[in-house]
Image (cartoon, rainbow, N blue to C red):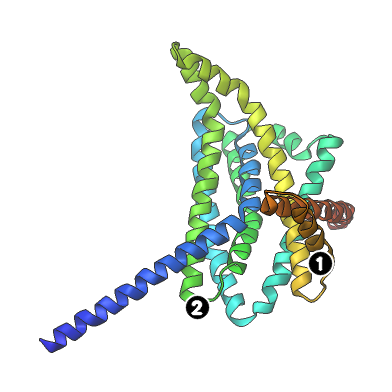
Amino acid sequence: MSGLLALLDDVAAIAKVAASSVDDIAAAATKAGTKAAGVVIDDAAVTPKYVTGFEAARELPIIWRISLGSLRNKLVFLLPVLLLLEAFAPWVITPLLMVGGLYLCFEGAEKLLHAFAPHADEAVAADMDVKDPKKLEEEKVAGAIKTDFILSAEIMTIALSQIEGGGFWLEAITLAIVGILITVVVYGAVALIVKMDDIGLHLAAGGGALAGLGRGLVQGMPVLLSVLSTVGTAAMLWVGGNIVVHGLHELGMHEPYGTIHHWAEAAAAAVPSGKGFVNWLVTAACDGVIGVILGMLLVPVAGLFMKKAAH
């Protein structure tokens, strides 16, 4: 009997530790997911283009295939690699984050240049030459999963950098939860976005009080996609600049982090209320400007590299 009581006491102790671990994991996952929000917005903004031009019946299956590829990227490839780096070469994490931040700056700058100086998209022209819908779908899905890999790597690295202690299993479970939840949120939102016009048409055709809502959804979709793209570009530049600035600070180069922090604190002190928001806004604006500058410097470098690679 005493052995059974001892066993029950051990089980209760394990349950308490497990409950505490769940709280720790939930807190870490929330913090990590929030920090990665900028990249998540861009992921949601980028993905809808991969189903453009397909029959409506193929849109959701394509998104489903991309979402499975995204989960594979995060859980099968990125999660174990990042955990190994964290265990045996943690000094690599900050430089990796900075490389990802530079990539975000580059992508954001390219989108800015395209917005102000539109040019023909060679990929679109190539798609027009593909006559086989199945082949085109395979190419689009493969391209989307490759793009997702880069964004997922940045999301998972940011998430890992936000987990403070807790050991191997806390990090592993937190990263898995973040990876799964972000994939569900992103591709669930993408599915809703690409089917919104179909939902609107259905409501409009039904008549009655919902017909106006349906027409509004159809007419509002181009505006929504445009806003989402703009927010995604701004998020890329802000997050990319922020990652580089903080990375330099952690590596011992305290500028421009120090100046930005000073400006943000001074601006917050100058307003009677909303100090936290003003602090964030000034910091984000400065990080965004740095993101634009870095991205514009990287665009010609990347173009030169691509030309040499082509030869």
> 136 or 81, which is in the foreground?
81
Residue located at (69% from left, 44% from top): 232
Callout 1 amino acid: Gly
- Give the side of residue 71 with respect to residue 132, left or right: left
> What is the crowding at mark 2: few (fewer than 14 residues within 10 Å), some, or many (at least 20)?
few
Residue located at (62% from left, 58% from top): 35
**Which residue lies most toward the front here?**
272
> 246 or 119, which is in the foreground?
246
The answer, for residue 103, to whether it is visible in the render is no
- Quarter holding the C terminus? bottom right
- Give the side of residue 178 with respect to residue 23, left or right: right
For numbered disc 2, what is the local secondary structure?
helix
**Which residue lies most toward the left here?**
1
Q: Where does the image place residue 184, in percent across and percent down from the top left? A: 49, 48
- Give the side of residue 99 with respect to residue 56, left or right: right
> 138 or 12, which is in the foreground?
12
